[in-house]
Amino acid sequence: LPSFCLLAGAALVLEAGVTPPPAAGDSRLWACILLSCLLSVLYNLASFSLLALTSALTVHVLGNLTVVGNLVLSRLLFGSRLSALSYVGIALTLSGMFLYHNCEFVASWAARRGLWRRDQPSKGL
């Protein structure tokens, strides 16, 4: 409820005067604002539930995937222009997620190539 009130209040304050007011009988704008606030609250509740069932790192990784998904969908649906730095960021994020989820595979690959020894002591990090 506090999140919903904050978002609704921010929408009222920030949107005032930016666009012409909707027609008296047209309540679609306010319905979209309320729907956006409600979806944000539901997203937060889903995040809290996920955090209770998994770890904070999983929520962080999914957050990164959400950002990548938003960029890709923005490009596909709205034709937004992405800079080269955006594409590099997407590639680094996806490769980091691959490395995180396949760390045993990466370690065995590095050991086969002689880049890392499994019996090598940890650096204590």
Image (cartoon, rainbow, N blue to C red):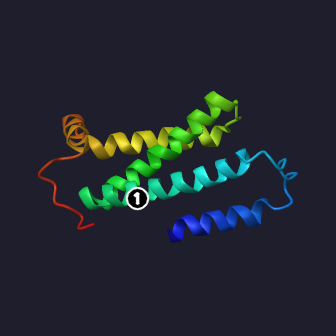
The residue to which callout 1 is attached is 45
Amino acid type, residue under disc 1 in the picture: Leu
Question: In the picture, residue 14 is in which quadrant?
Answer: bottom right
* Image quarter in which the C terminus is found: bottom left
Which of the pair 59/36 is nearer the observer? Answer: 36
The quarter holding residue 37 reads bottom right
Q: Given the current orientation, which residue lies at the most extreme front position?
A: 25
Q: Is residue 9 above or below residue 15?
A: below
Residue at image coords 49%, 58%: 41
How many callouts does the rendering have? 1
Residue 74 lies, in percent from the top left, at 63, 36
Comparing 112 with 10, the one in front is 10
Name the spot of residue 3 as percent of width and height, x first.
53, 67
Q: What crowding class fits label 1: few (fewer than 14 Cα within 10 Å), some (14-19), or many (20 or more)?
A: few
Query: At 62% across and 54% down in the image, what residue appears?
Result: 34
Q: Nearer the viewer, residue 3 or 62?
A: 3
Q: Residue furthest left?
A: 119
Q: Is residue 3 above or below residue 26?
A: below
Q: Is residue 32 above or below residue 17?
A: above
Front-lying residue, 86 or 54: 54
Residue at point 64% right, 32% down? 75
Is residue 93 placed above or below 76 in the rendered structure? below
Q: Secondary structure at mark 1?
A: helix
Question: Residue 24: x percent and y percent?
Answer: 83, 50
Outermost residue, bottom direction? Answer: 2
Where is residue 51 drawn, in percent x and y? 31, 59
Residue at image location 67% in from the left, 68% down from the top: 9
